Image (cartoon, helix red, strand yellow):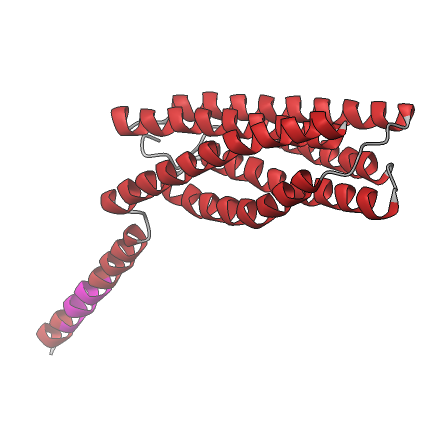
């Protein structure tokens, strides 16, 4: 009987051990595999190229339309596109480092700080321009080109931001998260500038645009501080 009990206990111990191994394997399977991570890097590179290409065009059109209409909000929107391009180029460098070296902690840290500075520059420009516009009571002309451009960006940017944000956990990258936040900010800025342009064109309320731009500047400043204070990743491939 003692032999039976011993065998039973041994079997139970083996069963528990197998169960623990199963739980460990299950937890391990939750981590992205090499192929999943490689696929995420390829997808991130593709989205990054879309961002750079679109924002280069967006910057040129917005700056030209802003100068033609005398619209500080459109000029700010164009410069935001320049910041978007800078953030995308920074992230492209980070992704290149991942493909080349595998370990990304150091490059990710530098990329995060650079993106934080781009947020700060955007906040400073938009905020200062809004205050100047309010103080001088500048009245921009209506811009159909600006309305069409910001409406298009309002459709594209949320999608880009969502796709970029989905890849961040697979890449283990705060730089990817920060760049997605930059794209989200561009979407909000598109909505604000679009509203200002439409209200100015239809009702002549010139002050609506700079007031909304102040809110965008505050949001950009908050993102700059949050991104700058972000710690280096604990879940990168080389952590």
What quarter of the picture does the C terminus occupy?
top left
In the displayed structure, would residue 106 be above or below residue 170? above
- Report x, y in % for residue 110: 46, 20
In the displayed structure, would residue 179 be above or below residue 124? below
- Report if residue 9 is visible in the image: yes
Q: Please state which of residues 127 and 71 is positioned toward the viewer in this rendering.
A: 71
Q: Please state which of residues 195 and 61 is positioned toward the viewer in this rendering.
A: 61
As for residue 132 lying within the magenta part, the answer is no
Q: Residue at point 87% right, 42% down?
A: 204
- To which quarter of the image does residue 24 belong? bottom left
Q: Seen from this angle, which residue lies furthest left?
A: 3
- To which quarter of the image does residue 71 belong? top right
Q: Residue at point 59% right, 31% down?
A: 61
- Report x, y in % for residue 58: 56, 34
* Apparent side of residue 165 relative to residue 128 in the rendered image (left or right): left
- Report x, y in % for residue 128: 78, 22
Judged by its main secondary structure, the magenta piece is helix
- Report if residue 229 is visible in the image: no
Q: How many marks?
A: 0
What quarter of the picture does the N terminus occupy?
bottom left
In the displayed structure, would residue 38 be above or below residue 131? below
- To which quarter of the image does residue 218 belong? top right
- Report x, y in % for residue 215: 77, 37
Q: Magenta residues?
A: 8-16
Q: Please state which of residues 76 and 13 is positioned toward the viewer in this rendering.
A: 76
* Apparent side of residue 83 relative to residue 46 in the rendered image (left or right): right
Q: Residue at point 24% right, 42% down?
A: 34
* Apparent side of residue 104 relative to residue 124 in the rendered image (left or right): left
Q: Residue at point 79% right, 33% down?
A: 214
């Amino acid at each position: 009987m003692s032999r039976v009990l011993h065998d039973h206990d041994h079997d139970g111990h083996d069963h528990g051990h197998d169960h623990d191994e199963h739980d460990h394997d299950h937890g391990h399977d939750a981590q992205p595999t090499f192929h999943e991570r490689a696929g995420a890097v390829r997808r991130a590179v593709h989205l990054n190229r879309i961002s750079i290409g679109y924002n280069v065009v967006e910057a040129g059109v917005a700056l030209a339309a802003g100068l033609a209409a005398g619209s500080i909000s459109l000029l700010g929107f164009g410069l935001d596109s320049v910041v978007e391009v800078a953030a995308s180029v920074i992230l492209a460098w980070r992704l290149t480092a991942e493909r080349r070296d595998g370990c990304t902690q150091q490059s990710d840290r530098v990329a995060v700080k650079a993106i934080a500075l781009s947020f700060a520059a955007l906040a400073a420009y938009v905020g200062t321009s809004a205050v100047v516009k309010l103080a001088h009571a500048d009245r921009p002309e209506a811009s159909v080109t600006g309305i069409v451009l910001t409406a298009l960006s309002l459709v594209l940017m949320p999608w880009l931001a969502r796709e970029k944000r989905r890849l961040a956990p697979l890449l283990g990258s705060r730089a990817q998260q920060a760049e997605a936040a930059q794209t989200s900010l561009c979407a909000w800025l598109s909505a604000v500038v679009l509203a200002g342009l439409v209200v100015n064109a239809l009702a002549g309320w010139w002050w609506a645009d700079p007031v909304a731009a102040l809110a965008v500047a505050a949001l950009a400043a908050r993102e700059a501080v949050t991104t700058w204070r972000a710690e280096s990743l604990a879940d990168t491939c080389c952590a």
